Image (spheres, grey):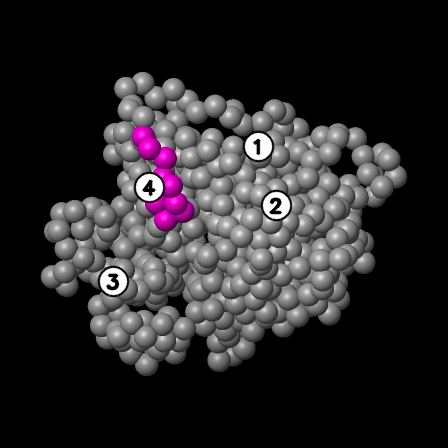
């Protein structure tokens, strides 16, 4: 399906190839010519890394109202209830479609869908395909898109900027694998670029999750929101010489324990719900236990049936085995890692941003459906629901602009984010990080799970200086180092926006926690 760079025009550009982009493509079937830009191959992306599952109120003892209530509770007071209701109500129907389209969800012996339970869910409602649910959903969706939509796919295309003409978005600038610049034009652009975990040194995200969509939208004048709320997954493999591989929340949902170096369970010391507390609370509990004991923390499944563990989690067991450990027997060292960004490019419920012609869906977007903390397994659901909604409305904009009726319209947001860094009295100037590795380390150390005024002030100053430098020193059109410079440029903007947002929020809530302001403050 990949084609040359010669045909560089379409009605709609989809930037990304995960669940939000694929579901949008299906909604566009027969209504628009679609161009899909993907940073790697169509087989990569955050969706394919999702292990645990997709949440939907479809099982016994469950209801739409219960799923709404659990989502609102996890969001710690900042969810938009209208967004949550759209997510839950349309999500159940969307998951049924996935099953009809050939997604091989796990089933019980009687043929009914198997439901897992994860933290902060009241009941079992997480559909899964072993421990590789995202990969299976992406496989089924891509097969349908390739057969029915047949988009023009440009692989290994790193989107760097949006084309803005007459106040509206009209295309995307990208670099190919060799660093050469190209432009593809269209009447509407959907950002479905996933998250920004790669701005942190410790992350569960794949290499493509560098925050490109957020940075591109911000440079184009779009509003961004809630970037202080970053979900740090509590259980990533923490072993020297090994990548920070995600150990799914489904492990704890099936009964795994968190233990300290002495083999003692400790979670109830910090949280009444123990291992099934929301992710932000489990993350802080692990960090506090490490601080209290001065030692490591482990995930243990040794008390469970070993054969059942290996059968339920084959991918995780295989990966842990490569690190020399037996998931079913050995305590596995774990610690937090950046996993998901609740904030992003602000949109309405149909994916429209504050810039006409620009849409966003999935993790790159902010509909306030997650509030301050995402409920486990609502992420794939978000991409499914809001990707479909964006895909359904974009042809209306395409038709209106083609006929000359396209007013400079967006969904009611006016203005853009403030570009100047807030004053930081008493904070010394800080040297900007010179490389992407140094930026990631600064972001992890100063904008990570435990934040303070001083850490955030230092990060804001250093990252702000870097943003100014990289924006002033753009690479030549075909510079050999262009891809590295673009990655640094986007990461600097996203990290700086995160640091500024966290610095300004003088309370702790959900994924944002400050040691100097440890309480929630509704005022």
**Residue closest to the eye, 466 or 108:** 466
Q: Report the residue at 29% width, 42% height from top.
A: 445
Q: Give the number of the disc on residue 477.
A: 2
65 sits left or right of 119 in the view: right
Q: Residues within 10 Å of mark 3 (few under 14, many from 20)?
A: few
Q: Is residue 67 above or below residue 402?
A: below
Q: Are marks 2 and 4 in contact (CB under 8 Å)?
A: no
Sequence-wise, the earlier of marks 1 and 2 is 1
User: Pointer 3: what residue?
Assistant: 240
Q: Report the residue at 54% width, 43% height from top.
A: 475
Q: Position of residue 425 (x, y in %)?
A: 31, 18
**Residue closest to the eye, 390 or 463:** 463
- The overriding secondary structure of the stretch rendered in magenta is loop
Q: Are marks 2 and 3 in contact (CB under 8 Å)?
A: no
Q: Position of residue 168 (x, y in %)?
A: 72, 34
Q: Residues within 10 Å of mark 2 (few under 14, many from 20)?
A: few
Q: Is residue 301 above or below residue 123?
A: below
Q: Which residues are magenta?
A: 430-439
User: Pointer 1: what residue?
Assistant: 223
- Tag nearer the camera, 1 or 4: 4
Q: Residues within 10 Å of mark 1 (few under 14, many from 20)?
A: many
Q: Are marks 3 and 1 in contact (CB under 8 Å)?
A: no
Distance in Å between CA atoms under marks 1 and 2 = 28 Å
User: Pointer 4: what residue?
Assistant: 442
């Amino acid at each position: 399906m990949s084609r040359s760079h010669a045909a560089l025009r379409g009605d709609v550009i989809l930037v990304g190839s995960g669940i939000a982009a694929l579901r949008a493509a299906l909604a566009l079937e027969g209504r628009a010519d679609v161009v899909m830009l993907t940073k790697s191959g169509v087989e990569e992306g955050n969706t394919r890394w999702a292990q645990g599952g997709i949440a939907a109120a479809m099982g016994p003892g469950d209801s739409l109202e219960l799923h709404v209530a659990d989502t609102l509770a996890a969001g710690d007071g900042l969810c938009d209830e209208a967004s949550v209701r759209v997510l839950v109500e349309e999500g159940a129907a969307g998951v049924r479609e996935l099953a009809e389209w050939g997604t091989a969800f796990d089933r019980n012996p009687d043929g009914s869908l198997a439901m897992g339970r994860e933290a902060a869910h009241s009941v079992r409602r997480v559909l899964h395909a072993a421990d590789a649910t995202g990969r299976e959903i992406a496989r089924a969706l891509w097969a349908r898109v390739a057969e029915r939509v047949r988009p023009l796919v440009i692989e290994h295309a790193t989107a760097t900027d949006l084309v803005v003409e007459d106040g509206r978005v009209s295309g995307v600038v990208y670099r190919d694998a060799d660093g050469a610049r190209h432009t593809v034009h269209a009447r509407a652009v959907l950002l479905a670029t996933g998250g920004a975990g790669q701005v942190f040194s410790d992350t569960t995200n794949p290499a493509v999750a560098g925050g490109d969509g957020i940075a591109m939208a911000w440079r184009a004048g779009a509003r961004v929101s809630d970037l202080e709320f970053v979900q740090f997954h509590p259980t990533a493999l923490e072993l020297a010489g090994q990548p920070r591989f995600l150990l799914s929340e489904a492990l704890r949902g099936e009964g795994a324990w968190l233990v300290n170096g002495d083999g003692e369970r400790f979670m109830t010391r910090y949280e009444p719900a123990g291992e099934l507390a929301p992710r932000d609370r489990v993350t802080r509990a692990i960090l506090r236990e490490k601080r209290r004991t001065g030692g490591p923390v482990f995930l243990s499944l040794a008390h469970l049936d070993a054969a059942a563990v290996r059968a339920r989690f084959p991918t995780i067991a295989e990966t842990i085995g490569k690190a020399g450990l037996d998931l079913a027997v050995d305590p596995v060292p774990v610690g937090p890692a950046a996993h998901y960004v609740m904030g992003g490019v602000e949109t309405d419920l149909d994916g429209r941003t504050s810039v006409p012609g620009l849409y966003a869906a999935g993790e790159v977007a902010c509909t306030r459906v997650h509030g301050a903390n995402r409920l486990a397994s609502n992420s794939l659901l978000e991409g499914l629901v809001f990707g479909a909604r964006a895909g359904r409305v974009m042809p209306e904009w395409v038709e209106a602009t083609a006929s000359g009726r396209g007013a400079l319209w967006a969904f009611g947001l006016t203005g853009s984010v403030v570009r100047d860094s807030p004053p930081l009295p008493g904070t010394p100037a800080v040297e900007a990080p010179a490389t992407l590795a140094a930026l990631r380390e600064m972001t992890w150390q100063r904008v990570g799970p435990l934040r303070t005024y001083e850490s955030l002030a230092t990060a804001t100053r250093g990252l702000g200086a870097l943003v100014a430098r990289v924006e002033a020193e753009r690479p030549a059109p075909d510079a050999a180092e262009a891809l590295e410079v673009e990655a640094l440029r986007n990461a600097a903007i996203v990290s700086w926006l995160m640091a500024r947002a966290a610095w300004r929020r003088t309370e702790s809530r959900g994924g944002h926690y400050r040691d100097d302001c440890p309480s929630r403050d509704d005022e």
